[in-house]
Every structure is written in structure tokens, then in C-alpha cells.
Amino acid sequence: MFSHQYLEPHQVNSFVYCKRKWFYQNRLKLQIPNENFEIGLYVHENHWMKTIKRKNIYLVSEKLRLKGICDYIIEENGIQTPVEVKKGKCMAEKPYKNDVMQLLCYILLLEDHLGLRYTHGYIIYVGSKRRFKVI
């Protein structure tokens, strides 16, 4: 199905969240307007950049046939750790499954790119001001 293309982490997120939306965007190539995207850009540029060192890191893996842009990478004890920022709220006790799958894709990309083993990453929900450590 993806023999000549790369799968992107946001596509994994969309597929897990809503298979119909994924189909419209990725198979029919329809653009679905989303004001949340614009809000997310504002949040990334103005709020979280004060605390996170690197942003929008493009990663690609020939081996995994996976590519994507990781929102942020922070350094903890000399180790680069991926951070996925969501503008929405998460009122659950744990992060949403589709967001976890997207973060795991970025972890796989970083492992392949840097040759390191990662133990965790973070998902930040701006709307509810919550941060989850994903192991």
C-alpha cells in the first residue's frame, strides 16, 4: 500500500482517530479546513518556544518508510527527547491513543536517525495545560 511512499506520524494519528477523515485526506487527497491548525501554529510560535530548544525537526527513515516533522526536541540529561504538542484538551487520565501512536512514530524515527534507544517522550495538551510522559 505504501511501497513507494513514506508514512507520516500525523497520518498514523489521523488513522487511529478517524479512519474516514484519514481516507478523505490521504486517499482522495481532499483538504479539510481546520481552524485548529492555525491556532496550533500560534501556540507553537508564541508559548512553548520559551521553554523548548529545538522545533520542527524533519526526520526520515528509509528502513521504516516513515517521515515526519517532530514538533520539539528537548534535552534531558544529554538525551534528546521528542515532544508532541496538541492545542486541544485532554481530560482523561492518560493521553489519547492516536496521540501516543504519533509520538511513538517520532521516537522510532529518532532511534533510526541517531542510533539511540529512547525510553520516553512527552505529549503536551495546551488546552488543558497537561503534560504526559509516555514510556
Image (cartoon, helix red, strand yellow):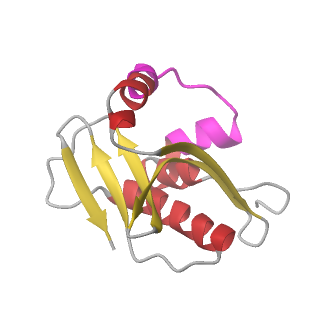
Q: Is residue 104 above or below residue 70?
A: below
Q: Residue furthest right?
A: 4
Question: Does residue 27 show up magenta in the picture?
Answer: yes
Q: Is residue 122 left or right of residue 28?
A: left
In the rendered image, the quadrant that contains the N terminus is: bottom right
Q: Position of residue 32 (x, y in %)?
A: 54, 25
Q: Is residue 74 above or below residue 87?
A: below
Q: Is residue 77 left or right of residue 66?
A: left
Task: Name the residue rendered at 60%, 43% in the picture.
Answer: 23
Q: In the depicted view, which residue is nearer to us: 49 or 8?
A: 49
Question: Does residue 98 show up magenta in the picture?
Answer: no
Which image quarter: residue 119?
A: bottom left
Which image quarter: residue 88?
A: top left
Q: In the depicted view, which residue is nearer to us: 38 or 21?
A: 38
Q: Residue furthest bottom?
A: 117
Image: magenta residue range: 21-40
Q: Position of residue 111 (x, y in %)?
A: 59, 73
Magenta stretch: helix, strand or loop mostly: helix
Task: Name the residue rendered at 60%, 47% in the picture.
Answer: 57
Q: Is residue 102 above or below residue 108?
A: above
